[in-house]
Amino acid sequence: MNDLFLRACRREPVERPPVWMMRQAGRYLPEYRAVRATADFLTMCHTPELATGVTLQPVDLMGVDAAIIFSDILVIPAAMGMSLTVDEGVGPQFADPVRTMHDLKRLHDVEPEEGLRFHCDALRMTRRELHGRVPLIGFAGAPWTLFAYMTEGKGTKSFSIAKKLLFADPVFSHTLMERLADNVGRFLVAQAAAGAQALQIFDSWSGSLGPREYREFALPYMARTAA
């Protein structure tokens, strides 16, 4: 097996830096666009055969040093009960953002092998199809980044609603962050059990917080996720 990526993760000496991309399967590949023409984005995420196929494309076509499973960080809030849509040219949206303690009653905690079984099945299938050629990376969204999407209802430049909630309702904010940290942690453990050989946590919107806000509302829950 090409274990260059795993050796680099362990901080072992490597003959060259490993090469992979954060989102390897995407519209820059004609082969990906051909699959995308037959199914919408969420259908691809929810169908293990399709997710496996597009995960393998960059490995087969470019010889990258690792495969990263095709999925999306927002599968967790969707599995918790939120209504997720991903429209072309618009991006992900939640029709029912959560902004109060009452809203949290709509959410349920997720057992990954049930609510996120499609993702675990895709990992198992991809691991088999790789035949040990390169390592397989699993991933999830960090609590703050998920919080930002879930409270705004969509991606924005400023995430002003999410940031206002941190101080307007800290009890709500910490409660949701705790639940997200626990759900993300279970999801990552399940991914490792399903075959992921490395795990990545995407905190895409951490840069929208100042140092004080990051230390109070993001970093502790990243640590809780990893515990």
Image (tube, rainbow, N blue to C red):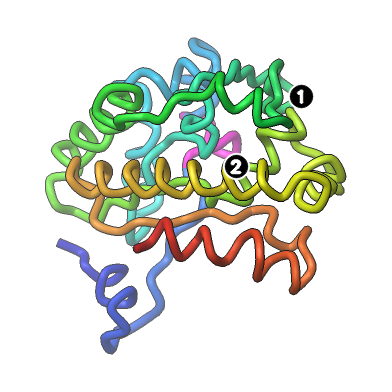
Measuring from the top left, give residue 50's x and y in whole percent.
Answer: 36, 22
Against 227, residue 173 (above or below) is above
Would residue 205 be found to the left or right of residue 158 on screen?
left
56 is within the stretch colored magenta? no
- Mark 2 lies on a secondary structure that is helix
- Give the residues drawn in magenta, as a range: 25-31
Can you tell which quarter of the image residue 114 is in?
A: top left
Write down the residue under mark 2: 146
Magenta-drawn stretch, dominant element (helix, strand or loop): loop
Can you tell which quarter of the image residue 41 is in?
A: top right
Would residue 39 be found to the left or right of residue 170 on screen?
left
Against 36, residue 140 (above or below) is below
Write down the residue under mark 1: 89
Name the residue located 46 percent from the left edge and 29 percent from the top edge: 31
Q: How many discs appear?
A: 2
Q: Residues within 10 Å of mark 1 (few under 14, many from 20)?
A: few
